[in-house]
Amino acid sequence: MSAIVGLFDRTGASLESGTITRMHEQLAHRGPDGGDCMQDGPVAVGHQLLATTPQARDDQPYRDGDLVITADARLDNRAELLSQLPGSLSPASPDSHLLLEAYRQWGTACVEHLIGAFSFAIWDERQPHLFCARDHVGVKPFYYHQTDDTFGFATELKALLTLPSVPGTVEDRRIGDFLTGRLEDQTISYYERLTRLPPAHAMVVTPTSLERWQYWDLDPSKTLSCASDRAYERRFRRTFEKAVRCRLRTTGRIGSELSGGLDSSSVTVVARDLLPESEPLHTFSTIFDEADSSDEREYIDAVTDDPGIVPHMIRPDGTGVLENETEMLTYFDRPPHNTLHFSVWELARRTDEVGVTIALNGVLGDCTANYGLGLLPQLFRTARWRHLWRELQAMGDHFDTPASHIFVRHVLFPLVPDSVRCSYRTYHEKPILEAKANPALNPAFVDRIDLRERYRELAGSQSIRVASTDRLLQYQSLTSERHAANLEAIDLRYGAFGVEPRYPFADKRLLELSLAIPPSQQFRDGWTRALVRRSLADLLPDLVQHRPWKTMMDEAFWNALENDRAAFEHLLEHPGPLAQYLAIDELQATYDRFETDPSGRDARTLWRARSLAAWLEAWPSQSQTLRLEQ
């Protein structure tokens, strides 16, 4: 959760020192443990340090001969790298030193040898070129800006907005993505000419070229074959424990974001099991007194009923959807995506108040600990009727759902040919965009950016495509382009409070293992996600282990929208720049419907309007101020 910035004058001219300083200062909140800049002719780099590991007290930016590095990195295969790399490295060497030595050893192929979370840039005077990379799933952000003369990069957009060559103009295509809930584009940002480096990508920037490539991908053709069910369980448990243990490497207090669901509970109980008895594990949870259907305290209490866990509860009843919006938008240089932003922002604040520097999180658990539902159409295709019927009946009992409904949704629907789906979507594309995605879209905006075609392309890459096997279905889920946007939002949230989020389910080794495990291990006796339930049976409370459904947060979300009544009334009377994107009369109709009969679609439309309007007021105007200060 440190931060990096950099600038490369591609003409070879020496940089003016104030430019990198302004970029660096924009990210001062991410450097409570120090920061510095280094300039050498046409290149300048900066670093803001949040020290969260025993080896993190390094002097970045770091120069070693003709190489300079700035990195926000946590390497999880340090022992392996130390055994393979020459030189004077030791177990006490900072991760940045290992990265630099790995580059000396393997060149740009060094990223193929790394495991962990990282975002870094290395200036190589010999080439000369700038080598940049982002980790496998996009835990660490990397934004950049390029012209014929300049290349700049940063951990957050706000640092790049200080550059004279950045216009600070809103990228309308990304606004369209946000308003329709399609965040699959991994390169576009909310500002024109500011780009995101996708996860598992690296690039080399020279005075005359920029080459970007994908250095890693999951392989859905690989299959793991173990001798018994118990062998699969041991393999998963061992790998998951390794993923959690790597993320416990810290010098500070450790916390865990605990919702009470299977993912966050699994992370929490394994972390508690691995930590020394003398070291408490702090958990941070949201509970609701005024939204019973959104309250998960019985599951949270079951997990925290352990003397080694110190629970902290957030009660956000009575708050609006953008509580503390002035403070929050100081840090959020993009519209908040999370409909529960009013609660997760307070979770991050409480984490900081308690003195926790590492916050474990169950993100990607749904994808890694696979549901295994692709097994059902496979049983149908291979005419294993009795097995299919047993699973349908068992699942119906566990989830209190008729077996016939499960059959239609999870067996027949996936078997509909893609050609039929595409034809249906093409025929109904207009009502799907307005009636499903966002009924308040301004028609002029839709036409101006050809949003209908963009929506079809982005939605088609995910919603139309149905995998022929469970493994391909899981591959699509694990490689969803939406993960990067979610991780970037969490990064901004915790970055504001000097806390580093860590995600055991995003471990590269665990992703590869999970994808190779047969679906018959993931779905068993009517239970989805059966392998993680079985593997952690001795640690998970029975109430959580056999929990069939996730808790729906609709009631809490709707309450927060209703608590924001004054803000919505002001927005409808004074829409300002929001009117470019939404038809205010339709937005008023949406609000009126929600007042009398709340629905998920209308709630999402109102949330996106509220979030976008707040950001438009705060950031596009602020980006102009950043440039004027130069």
Image (cartoon, rainbow, N blue to C red):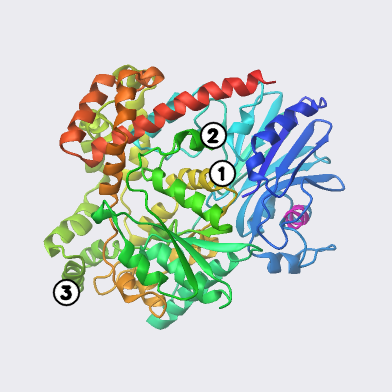
Foreground residue among 476 and 597: 597
Residue 43 sits in which quadrant? Answer: top right
Q: Residues within 10 Å of mark 1 (few under 14, many from 20)?
A: many
Q: Residue 63: horizontal and vertical position, in percent?
A: 83, 47
Name the residue that disc number 2 marks: 330
438 in the magenta segment:
no
Amino acid type, label 3: Arg
- Name which residue lies at 31% across and 20% down: 442
**Residue at (40, 43) in percent of width and height:** 342
Q: Quadrant of residue 388?
A: bottom left
Q: Earlier in the sequence, mark 3 or mark 2?
A: 2
Q: Which residue is mark 3?
A: 386
- Relative to residue 153, is residue 287 depicted above or below? below
Does residue 509 appear to the left or right of 316 in the view shown? right
Label 3: which secondary element:
helix
The magenta stretch spans which residues?
96-103
Amino acid of disc 1:
Ala
Asked if the residue under mark 2 is in contact with the one under mark 1, i.e. CB atoms within 8 Å, the reply is yes
Number of other residues with Cα within 10 Å of mark 3, as a class: few under 14, some 14 to 19, many 20 or more: few
Any mark on residue 169, and which? none
Please give the residue where the numbered disc 1 appears in the rendered image.
496
Q: Earlier in the sequence, mark 1 or mark 2?
A: 2
Gap between marks 1 and 2 measured at Cα:
9 Å
SS at circle 2: helix
Mark 1 vs 3: CB contact within 8 A = no
Toward the viewer: 337 or 304? 304
Relative to 338, say whether 22 is above or below. Answer: above
